[in-house]
Image (cartoon, rainbow, N blue to C red):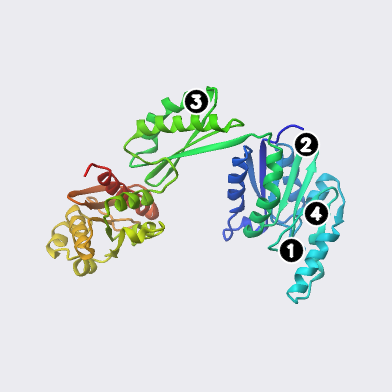
Amino acid sequence: MRPVTTAEILAVGSELLTPHRIDTNSLHLTDKLNALGIDVRFKGVVGDDPDALAGAFRTALSRADVVISTGGLGPTADDLTREAVAVVLGRALVRDASVEAAIRRRFEQRRLHMPAGNLKQADVPAGGKALPNPNGTAPGIWIAHGEQIIVLLPGPPREMREIYTAHVAERLHARTGGRQVRRRMIRIAGRAESHVDEIAAPIYTPWASSSIPIETSILASPGQIELHLSARGDDLPEIDRALDAGVRSLAEALAPAVFSVDGRSLEAVVGELLHARSWTLAVAESCTGGLVGARLTDVPGSSAWFAGGVIAYANESKLRDLDVDAALLDRHGAVSEPVADAMADGVRVRFATEAAISITGIAGPDGGTVDKPVGTVAIAMRAGQARQVRTFRFAGDRQMVRQQSVIAALEMLRQALIAPL
């Protein structure tokens, strides 16, 4: 039997076709399938319509070794996944006595009346295998269809994930022929995507035709670039050596903008650098409204190096809470390097820290002027004796400006912290 190498994921449910619900199951499944060396070639969202469901499964089976669906296994009339698959495969639905007993037992243990509709959850396409669901009444279903595999999983993430881990992952692994995927990620701050690719492309392009082909992709988010490297095969030590060598080559070429080669976030890296010096950090934020502090406190153990912050959104708060001189505000305006400098000094004194960050800017959509358009942000940094202040012009909407401001501020501090003492 040939190894399975490709997959398609179908998220079932009309609610997923509205703005109110998002399919997150496919992200989790993609990660798990990729780790097994199975490429997810297509994803789809299908409403609770029998013809649409049957068409989606037929199409998926025409182009993938593995088809996994989530949702549509509930007890109500619009839960039609198992019925649609039975039609597509030309198989009857067979009541699984052990599943029926488990459903009845679940209701009895809770002293609840069992609606008759729940019994449909014990129906399995002939030849399929029910996969126990300890967290709900809908079992998963594994179906072998020639050399292809169909897996039906419940929609609730907690149920879907446990069934996949306990009953699907090992079965799929046995069908991959030992082929697995290894991945690496390089994170970069302070560089544009085109600039990164200009440096990186000559390095990674030859890898596609090497003895161990390495796939490389670039992902851009506000203020940050990620380089993703992946390779697949059955000789995992050799794959790891090739990927490690690739990471070293790219990191050396892109230094010092590379802040992580092991998945750590920028805020985690900054925290480790502060902790290594036994320093603490305070932040003063205006336009970012606490986003820097939120990211810092997302890092476990940040209380060891993060002292606190001040959200000085209004000018009155800058005067009262950070001791910014009113003359600076009058002369330069709130969004200016002198005011950012004063904010950094003020918060550093207030919290008695070795390091400080301040951000003041115009995030939009209004408030900009000819001299200071929307996206103008002044950032100041203190790290021991090091002092820096810069004015940035960020593009994008309000949220993008705020996100880029956070990254730029943390990167300014990181650069100071990696400098020799």
**Residue denoted by label 4:** 83
Q: Quadrant of residue 108?
A: bottom right
Looking at the image, is 240 positioned above or below residue 343? above
Residue 360 x %, y %:
26, 57
Of marks 2 and 1, which one's residue comes earlier in the chain? 1
For the point 79% across and 49% down, the residue is: 85
Task: Using a 10 Å C-alpha cutoff, classify the residue at mark 1 as few (fewer than 14 neighbours), some (14 to 19) or many (20 or more).
Answer: many
Dot label at residue 207: 3
Is residue 375 among what the camera can see? Answer: no
Of marks 4 and 3, which one's residue comes earlier in the chain? 4
- Mark 3 to mark 1 CA distance (whole Å): 48 Å
For the point 72% across and 46% down, the residue is: 56
Q: Contact (CB < 8 A) between labels 2 and 1?
A: no
On-image quarter of the N terminus: top right
Lateral position of residue 37 relative to residue 117, left or right = left
Task: Using a 10 Å C-alpha cutoff, classify the residue at mark 3 as few (fewer than 14 neighbours), some (14 to 19) or many (20 or more).
Answer: some
On-image quarter of the C terminus: top left
Q: Contact (CB < 8 A) between labels 4 and 3?
A: no
Of marks 4 and 1, which one's residue comes earlier in the chain? 4
- Mark 4 to mark 1 CA distance (whole Å): 17 Å
Q: Amino acid at mark 4?
A: Glu
Is residue 10 among what the camera can see? Answer: yes
**Residue denoted by label 1:** 137
Q: Contact (CB < 8 A) between labels 2 and 3?
A: no
Residue 139 x %, y %:
75, 57
Dot label at residue 147: 2
- Mark 4 to mark 2 CA distance (whole Å): 21 Å
- Mark 4 to mark 3 CA distance (whole Å): 46 Å
Q: Amino acid at mark 2?
A: Glu
Residue 328 x %, y %:
14, 60
- Mark 2 to mark 1 CA distance (whole Å): 29 Å
- Mark 2 to mark 3 CA distance (whole Å): 32 Å
